[in-house]
Image (cartoon, helix red, strand yellow):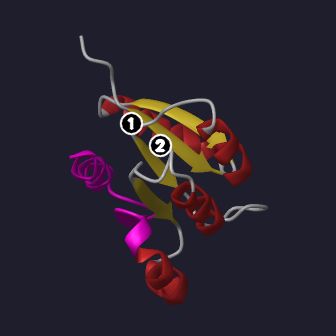
């Protein structure tokens, strides 16, 4: 049996981590979670993942800072990143535009489960 693709959730809301983990398991993925940006970057030093789900609005290290850290690291930059944020990208148009080439998709919370799974499958192609 093939290994399930591992998806790292970088999020600072434990309830959202639980929800995303359940959605990922139901979609045939192996979820791994980091509570916040710093923990996410640290975890990426120790594990390999197929995709990253990244929140933007986090205390300490923001999602944009995490994204910059991922894309600056040659060993991580090819990992697809999907933004999952309560903030619509038009609310932060300058940041979204500046980082547009660094992420594969952007979903606004609350999201439709099938849309999230569809974005993940598309990004993993």
- Residue nearer the viewer, 59 or 5: 5
Instruction: Say few, some or many: other residues with alpha carbon within 10 Å of mark 2 (under 14 / 14 to 19 / 20 or more).
Output: many
Which residue lies at the image location 30% right of the left edge and 48% below the top edge?
120
Q: Are marks 1 and 2 in contact (CB under 8 Å)?
A: yes
Q: Which residue is mark 2?
A: 20
Q: Position of residue 20 (x, y in %)?
A: 47, 43
Which residue lies at the image location 43% right of the left edge and 55% below the top edge?
81
In terms of secondary structure, where does tag 2 sit? helix
Q: Position of residue 29 (x, y in %)?
A: 36, 31
Q: Would residue 91 be seen by someone viewing this image from the given angle?
A: no
Q: Which residue is mark 1?
A: 24
Q: Is residue 39 magenta?
A: no
| Quarter occupied by the N terminus | top left
In terms of secondary structure, where does tag 1 sit? helix
Instruction: Say few, some or many: other residues with alpha carbon within 10 Å of mark 1 (under 14 / 14 to 19 / 20 or more).
Output: many
Q: Separation of disc 1 and disc 2 at Cα?
A: 6 Å
Question: Which range is magenta?
Answer: 101-125
Q: Is residue 112 magenta?
A: yes
- Residue nearer the viewer, 118 or 43: 43
Residue lying at the far top of the rendered structure: 1
Q: Is residue 70 left or right of residue 52?
A: right
């Amino acid at each position: 049996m093939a290994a399930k693709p591992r998806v790292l959730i970088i999020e600072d809301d434990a309830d959202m981590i639980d929800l995303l983990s359940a959605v990922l398991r139901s979609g045939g993925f192996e979820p791994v979670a980091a509570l916040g940006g710093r923990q996410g970057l640290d975890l990426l030093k120790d594990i390999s993942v197929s995709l990253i789900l990244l929140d933007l609005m986090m205390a300490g290290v923001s999602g944009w800072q995490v994204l910059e850290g991922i894309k600056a690291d040659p060993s991580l930059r090819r990992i697809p990143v999907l933004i999952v944020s309560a903030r619509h990208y038009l609310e932060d148009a300058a940041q979204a535009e500046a980082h547009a080439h660094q992420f594969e998709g952007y979903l606004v919370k609350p999201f439709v489960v099938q849309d999230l799974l569809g974005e993940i499958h598309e990004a993993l192609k």
